[in-house]
């Protein structure tokens, strides 16, 4: 999508995400394919794996308009999040082909990049655990302690 306007790139990415609903795009067997959209990303859920693509947009606090910057931000996300979730964050993959016929880790030049992760059970999300009444003060304190230790150990 080099040289495309932000809206052209957004349309191409939306086509790409629609095309990634096809199990043939993946180098592994898939389950039901679903998409979770955030303000800056699309997360494609495939059953065994999840693929997080950055939207080609520019906001006051980030610029994902260039393919190279999306790749760089994927690499940063992988590096940073592996510190606390090394079993979930696997690698950065290239998406090749075209927006209408993409391939994860396929041959040819990359048209997009994504962070490949192990997909986890959505019932494990903290929000779901709160809904089920599984979160108490002890768990919150333990989580807060873990976050405090993590931050204290970071190199400044």
Image (spheres, rainbow, N blue to C red):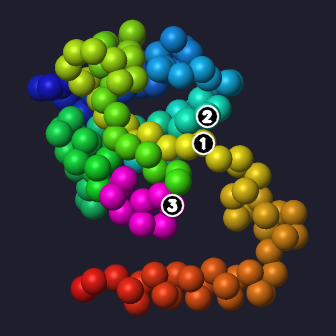
Residue at x-position 74% and y-position 81% = 139
Up the image or down, 8 lies above or below 139; here it is above
Earlier sequence position, callout 1 versus callout 3: 3
Q: Residue 86 carries which label?
A: none
Proximity of marks 2 and 1: CB atoms separated by less than 8 Å: yes
What residue sits 26% from the left and 42% below the top?
Answer: 70
Residue position for label 1: 119
Q: Which residue occupies the extreme front position in the image?
A: 87
Could you say where residue 10 lies in the image, as x and y percent from the top left?
33, 30
Q: Give the range drawn in magenta.
A: 77-86
Return the mark for residue 48.
2
Quadrant in the picture for the N terminus = top left
Marks 2/3 in contact by CB < 8 Å: the verdict is: no
- Residue 43 makes an appearance in the image: no
Q: How crowded is mark 2: few (under 14 residues within 10 Å), some or many (20 or more)?
A: some
Q: Is residue 93 left or right of residue 88?
A: left
Q: In the image, what residue occupies the spot 44% across and 46% down?
A: 90
Mark 2 vs mark 3, CA separation in Å: 16 Å
């Amino acid at each position: 999508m080099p040289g495309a306007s932000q809206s052209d790139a957004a349309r191409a990415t939306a086509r790409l995400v629609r095309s990634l609903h096809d199990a043939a795009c993946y180098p592994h067997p898939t389950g039901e394919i679903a998409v979770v959209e955030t303000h800056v990303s699309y997360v494609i859920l495939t059953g065994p794996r999840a693929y997080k693509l950055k939207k080609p947009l520019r906001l006051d606090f980030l610029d994902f308009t260039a393919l190279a910057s999306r790749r760089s931000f994927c690499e940063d996300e992988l590096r940073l999040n592996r510190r606390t979730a090394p079993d979930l964050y696997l690698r950065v993959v290239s998406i090749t082909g075209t927006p209408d016929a993409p391939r994860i880790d396929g041959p040819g030049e990359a048209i997009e990049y994504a962070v490949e992760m192990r997909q986890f059970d959505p019932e494990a999300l903290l929000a779901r655990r709160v809904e089920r009444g599984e979160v108490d003060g002890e768990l919150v304190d333990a989580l807060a302690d873990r976050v405090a230790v993590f931050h204290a150990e970071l190199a400044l």
